[in-house]
Image (cartoon, rainbow, N blue to C red):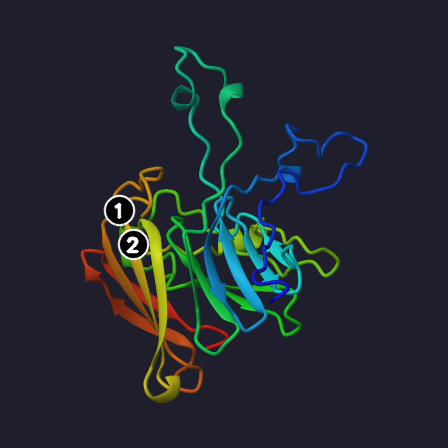
Amino acid sequence: VVEESQLVFRGGGSSVTRTNRGDGSSRPGSNNDHNRGHAEGSIDAVVLIDDETFVTGSDNGALSLWSVHKKKPLFSIPAAHGCDAPLAPDEASAERSPSPGVVGAPLPRWITALAGVPFSDVVVSGSWDGAVRAWRVSEDRRRLEALGPVGWLPPDDPDTRADLHADADATLHQPPPASGQLASATPHPQQQQRQQHARVRGVINALSVFERGERGRDGLCIAVAVGKEHRLGRWIKVPRARNGGVVFEVRCRGAASGAGEGGTANGDGGEGAGEGLGGA
């Protein structure tokens, strides 16, 4: 008889991101946004890296790195795709003259899709912030590193201005701190000034990555299924979104300078443009 036929991993992130320090700032219900976390309800996306390592995406926006030898994640990035803007007071309350205090904290965008680049340590994730984001597992298999968004255009591009997502406040991540296992999702002010604007408008419900050419020498294709709403329910509805697909072409560094070509969308999803991945 096999002693252990299955492994149960512990999901469900805490609603607090720091331990109590004596000043009450890390207790549940604290008004300190810097110390406020988001409770995890479900893990909706999983992608396998190798025989012992995998990455998950949760409905609290956390991207987590796991090992089959541990029941808790080795490394987590909270709010990997940023947070939605808070509701206006008149939308959050039925009162005629609501006070600003009725508005809750901004909620993180869920990780709605994950996919891995074949035979590499790179994964891509999707939500409804308007971008497909690329991540790389470190060499020691103990942390995730942000590679940046895929298929974003410069802000001065005319197509970018025309297709600017109303609430695309993409988060460009700083390198994770060496001492902690919980990375910060707050962008640097200079990175905020250099933000670029996405062309994937809607909820990313599925991702698929496949190689181009012989043994992937011509690069990769990233296929994105985009919808007006989440695939499992009508909790999320993105304004001006369309149901369709977007394909990004990503060139290998040996085949080009690292920039991807524009990909034509299937259905009515529009067009996209790719960008080179560090692990491609």
- Residue drawn at the location 34% of the way across and 58% of the way down: 206
Q: Nearer the viewer, residue 226 or 273?
A: 226
Q: Nearer the viewer, residue 191 or 247?
A: 247
- Expressed as whole percent of the image width and height from the top left, the position of residue 172 reads 52, 56
- Outermost top residue: 96
Numbered badge on residue 226: 2
Q: Nearer the viewer, mark 2 or mark 1?
A: 2
Q: Are marks 2 and 1 in contact (CB under 8 Å)?
A: yes
- Residue drawn at the location 38% of the way across and 56% of the way down: 155
Element assignment for label 1? loop
- Residue drawn at the location 71% of the way across and 35% of the way down: 26
- Outermost bottom residue: 214
Q: Is residue 162 above or below residue 103?
A: below
Left of 200 or right of it: where is 149?
right
Left of 68 or right of it: where is 193?
left
Numbered badge on residue 241: 1
- Expressed as whole percent of the image width and height from the top left, the position of residue 78 reads 57, 49
Real-space CA distance between mark 2 and mark 1, rounded to the nearest whole angstrom: 8 Å
